[in-house]
Image (cartoon, rainbow, N blue to C red):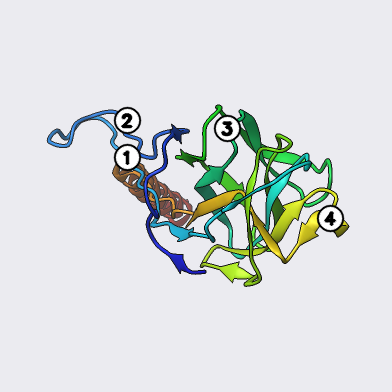
């Protein structure tokens, strides 16, 4: 088991949930208009073990993890037996609050989801689970926990186990990609307006002070 940056192999299917670069207004060469380019912070990827066994009879199956920092879950590869299903990020209890979900079309043996922006809160535990019965893949695994800079994978999740969690098996997910929250950088025009406002306020205060002196 290892943790590394970058994907491991090529999946037969891909979902790209949204683009990660935003531009608005103006052009690079011109002085008019606003321009802001937002780049995604460099991601960490927990690869996970090879999923070489088929799950049967479990209504949901996947992994339990804890967010170590305020960060985002940006993608993963989900293994399956060919049926369509939904993957959900939820509170770590049966029928827990669902924070995010994505639909996976029928595919086998795996499908890559990328471009997500699922917020993770530091210190919070989550389940990442697939929800079609007898459709998952898993591996026998005893190396929990597995961590990168953003999350720690604590166990596998399968309903019908004690507390629905197990440290003997890893369910469904490989190439679990997370990224730190990118710092917000003010647009140059916003900084200029802030500077003008500060200068104007300082001038107004000086004028007020002069009025008091002459009065």
Mark 4 / mark 1, whichever is N-terminal: 1
Q: Within the image, what quadrant is residue 31 found in?
A: top left
Q: Position of residue 54 (x, y in %)?
A: 65, 46
The residue singled out by tag 4 in the image is 161
Answer few, some or many: residues within 10 Å of disc 4's Cα (few below 14, many 20 plus, some between 14 and 19): few
Q: Position of residue 10 (x, y in %)?
A: 37, 45
The residue singled out by tag 3 in the image is 82
In this rendering, which labeled residue sits more in front, label 4 or label 1? Answer: 4
Using the numbered discs, state the Cα–Cα distance from disc 2 to disc 1 in whole angstroms. 6 Å
Using the numbered discs, state the Cα–Cα distance from disc 2 to disc 4 in whole angstroms. 50 Å
Q: Which mark is residue 36?
A: 1
Answer few, some or many: residues within 10 Å of disc 1's Cα (few below 14, many 20 plus, some between 14 and 19): some
Q: Is residue 14 left or right of residue 83?
A: left
Helix, strand or loop at mark 2: loop
Using the numbered discs, state the Cα–Cα distance from disc 4 to disc 1 in whole angstroms. 49 Å
Mark 1 / mark 3, whichever is N-terminal: 1
The answer to the question of whether label 4 and label 1 lie on touching residues, with beta carbons closer than 8 A, is: no
Using the numbered discs, state the Cα–Cα distance from disc 3 to disc 2 in whole angstroms. 41 Å
Using the numbered discs, state the Cα–Cα distance from disc 3 to disc 4 in whole angstroms. 24 Å
Using the numbered discs, state the Cα–Cα distance from disc 1 to disc 3 in whole angstroms. 42 Å
Residue under the point 47% across and 40% down? 112
Helix, strand or loop at mark 4: loop
The residue singled out by tag 2 in the image is 24
In-front residue for pair 56/149: 56
Residue under the point 52% across and 57% down? 50
């Amino acid at each position: 088991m290892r943790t590394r940056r970058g994907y491991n192999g090529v999946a037969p299917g891909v979902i790209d949930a949204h683009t990660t670069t935003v531009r608005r207004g103006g052009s690079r060469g011109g002085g008019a208009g606003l321009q802001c380019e937002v780049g995604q912070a460099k991601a960490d990827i927990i690869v996970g073990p090879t999923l070489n066994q088929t799950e049967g009879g479990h209504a949901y199956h996947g992994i339990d993890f804890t967010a170590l920092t305020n960060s985002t879950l940006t993608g993963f590869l989900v293994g399956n037996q060919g049926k369509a299903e939904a993957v959900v990020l939820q509170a770590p209890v049966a029928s827990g609050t669902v924070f995010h979900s994505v639909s996976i079309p029928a595919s086998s043996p795996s499908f890559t989801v990328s471009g997500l922006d699922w917020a993770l809160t530091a210190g919070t535990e989550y389940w990442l689970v697939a929800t079609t019965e007898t459709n998952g893949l898993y591996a026998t695994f005893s190396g929990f926990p597995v961590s990168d800079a953003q999350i720690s994978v604590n166990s596998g999740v399968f309903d019908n186990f004690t507390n629905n969690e197990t440290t003997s098996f890893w369910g469904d997910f490989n190439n679990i990609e997370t990224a730190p929250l990118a710092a917000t950088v003010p647009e140059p025009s916003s900084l200029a307006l802030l500077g003008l406002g500060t200068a104007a306020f300082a001038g107004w205060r000086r004028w007020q002070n002069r009025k008091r002196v002459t009065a």
